[in-house]
Image (cartoon, grey):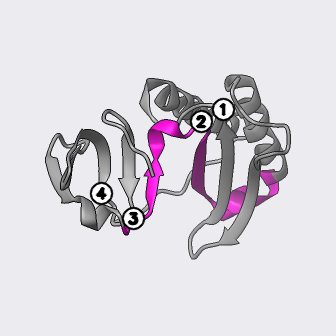
């Protein structure tokens, strides 16, 4: 497997960050917390590797919790969530090669669970990804307001 300095990677043990140095015996990874971790190459050779820098598509998945009394509004809500995401996100994949879903999935003790799952033609890192993720969240919020439904908040 080839990894180059500067690429963002994630290893099977959960180590994630930018490769800052590839040495003969060890690799240095800088995490998002700015800590540099030195990992022996013998350890890395046996682990799964995700090269995030080479990933060209991303996913935004949200699990939402709504009140029981809003259940009758779900058909319109779910359609509007998808409509708002389609309108807000130009990189949304809608050709059938990746799922684009908004479904009521479960009953909870004090809520009804809805899952929104959307895939995009953007890398899963950086400002473009974060901006796209924010657009998805705003689209969900807009659809909830339009359908007059309320989120259930976790009580402490």
Q: Tell whether 93 sits left or right of 56.
A: right
Residue 56 is labelled as 2
Question: Label 3, label 1: how many angstroms apart (C-alpha)?
Answer: 25 Å
Residue occupying image coordinates x 60% and y 44% = 59
SS class, disc 4: loop
- Quick one: SS at disc 3? loop
Percent x, y of residue 127 = 44, 25
Name the outermost residue toward the bottom: 109
Q: 97 or 25: which is nearer to us?
A: 25
Answer whether labels 2 and 4 touch (C-beta < 8 Å): no
Please tell me whether mark 3 or mark 1 is closer to you in this view: 3
What separation in Å lies between label 2 and label 3 (alpha carbons)? 20 Å
Q: Which residues are drawn in magenta?
A: 46-74
Residue at the spot of label 1: 121
Q: Does 128 sit left or right of 150 as displayed?
A: left
CA–CA distance between discs 2 and 4? 21 Å
Q: Which residue lies at the image location 32% right of the left edge and 33% below the top edge?
A: 6
From the image, tell me which residue sits under label 3: 12
Tell me if label 1 and label 2 are in contact, CB under 8 Å: yes
Assess disc 1: are there few (<14), some (14-19) or many (≥20) residues with their C-alpha within 10 Å of its C-alpha: some
């Amino acid at each position: 497997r080839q990894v180059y300095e500067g690429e963002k990677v994630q290893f099977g043990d959960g180590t994630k960050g930018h490769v800052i140095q590839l040495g003969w015996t060890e690799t240095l990874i800088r995490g998002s917390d700015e800590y540099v971790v030195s990992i022996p190459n013998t350890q890395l050779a046996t682990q799964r590797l995700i090269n995030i820098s080479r990933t060209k598509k991303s996913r935004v998945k949200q699990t939402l919790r709504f009140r029981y009394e809003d259940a009758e509004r779900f058909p319109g809500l779910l359609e509007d969530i998808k409509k708002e995401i389609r309108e807000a996100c130009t990189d949304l994949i809608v050709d059938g090669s990746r799922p684009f879903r908004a479904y009521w999935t479960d009953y909870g003790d004090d809520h009804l669970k809805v899952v929104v799952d959307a895939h995009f033609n953007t890398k899963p890192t950086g400002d473009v990804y974060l901006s796209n993720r924010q657009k998805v969240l705003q689209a969900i919020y807009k659809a909830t307001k339009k359908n007059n439904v309320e989120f259930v908040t976790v009580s402490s």
